[in-house]
Amino acid sequence: MKKLMLALAIASMSTAAIAQETVTVTDVPVKENSVETNSFWSNWFISAGVNLNAFYSSQELNLSKSPFNDRGKVGFNVAVGKWFTPGLGLRAKFDGVKGVQVNGAVWSPDNEDFSYWNLHGDVLFNLSNMIFGYNENRVWNFIPYVGSGAIRNCSTNNYTWGANLGILNTFRINKRLSVNFEVGALVAPKGFDGDATKAKDKAWRAADKVLTASVGLTVNLGKTTGFRKATDVDALMALNQSQLDALNSALAAQQNENARLKEELAKKPKEVVRTEYQKEYVSAPRSIFFNIGSSKIASRKEIVNLQVLADAVKADNSIKLKVTGYADSATGSAAFNQTLSEKRANRVADELVKLGVSRDNLIVEGLGGVATLTPNSYNRRVIVDVVK
């Protein structure tokens, strides 16, 4: 009868220990103003369109006030870029390829067309996301940009540099496709058109300029086309607190029962049941969780889960603990995740040492990024297991 009671107690303790590893969450809480960093190959885009441009040279006077009247020329543009955060991106863009040469003091119909191109890099600022928060389903995004690059007047074989600024507007069709409308300006040294003079008493004529308006399509590339909200680990822990409280209550009841059983076992030290009980009790692995990109333990309450393992090692020096660190493969590069998993494993190992475990009884390793658990935040953890 006593052996039956002991077997039932052991089964209950094993179930409680395993239950600590199984948490079912149907609605994972997220941080409203934080997103997860995506991999390098996520959030790329390409765009192409047609543009209407108008040149203003440094030496012209008495021209039409309409920027595209008499001098507008149709060209094209292509660009490739990447969003690193919802508010910040980079792109490389090619603009061209026809303009109207205006080198005289007064524009005339005799001014000749010429060819040119502008290859520039731009920094994009999505003010819609910066001001109103990230929303992957937002229809209109307002995106100012600044940049610089190389330009060439192909007709005069003149290379120089230029500064670019403008406003990009994108209108979402679906997660892969959007329409873009852009207005911008190129400012170049006054010798870009082949004539380095400037109209006297006209300060704004100190440089050659191009005004551009374009319309086109943008295609989002990569395995991810947006940003996921970062999991709020603190809120997640609070969400499951009722489950943890129930488990702790059951554990307290089992500890009281164990104390009674130990008193009975002390009267019969030759029985083998105690050894089997200890083995079952400490064999269940413990998991310690971390926030995204961090090697700081998310909740100090989780350190309590290590006390049983520490006590077992101190009671039996032949027991060793394997401390294995992980990161989630959905965020960060492979090299970053490998380093992060090692830092997490070493952080938990340090906590075990504080609990009295010798370094000689620890096997510490980091296995980099994984995607074995759902939700993805559960992959940011360290597992402590018993080995012999």
Image (cartoon, helix red, strand yellow):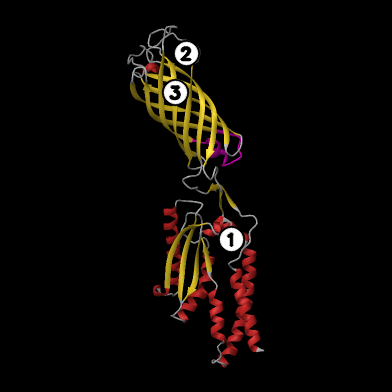
Image vertical order of residue 37 relative to residue 304, above or below:
above
Magenta run includes residue 140: yes
Amino acid type indicated by mark 1: Met
Residue 26, image quadrant: bottom right
Q: Nearer the viewer, mark 1 or mark 2?
A: 2
Three-letter amino acid code of the residue under disc 3? Gly
Asked if the residue under mark 2 is in contact with the one under mark 3, i.e. CB atoms within 8 Å, the reply is no
Q: Choose mark 1 or mark 3, whichever is in front.
A: 3
Q: Residue at x 47, y 54 (%)?
A: 293
Report which residue position mark 3 lands on: 96
Q: Position of residue 54 (x, y in %)?
A: 46, 17
**Mark closer to the chain start, 1 or 3:** 3
Q: Name the element at disc 3.
A: strand
Task: Measuring from the top left, give residue 197's x and y in whole percent.
Answer: 33, 14
Query: From what the image shows, is residue 90 above or below residue 191?
Result: below
Task: State which mark lies toward you, 3 or 2.
Answer: 3
Q: Which residue is mark 1?
A: 237
Upstream in the sequence, badge 1 or badge 2?
2
Q: Say which residue appears at 48% left-offset and 24% top-offset.
A: 76
- For residue 133, what is the image quadrant? top right
Whole-number angstrom distance, CA of label 1 to CA of label 3 = 56 Å
Q: Which residue is mark 2?
A: 71
Q: Which residues are magenta?
A: 125-141
Mark 1 Cα within 10 Å, few/some/many (few <14, many 20+)? some
Determine the image quadrant of residue 163: top left
User: Residue at 41% across / 54% down in the picture?
Assistant: 335
Structural distance between the alpha carbons of marks 1 and 2: 65 Å
Q: Could you tell me how far apart the alpha carbons at marks 3 and 2 are, in whole angstroms?
A: 15 Å
- Give the residue at x 52% y 49%: 36
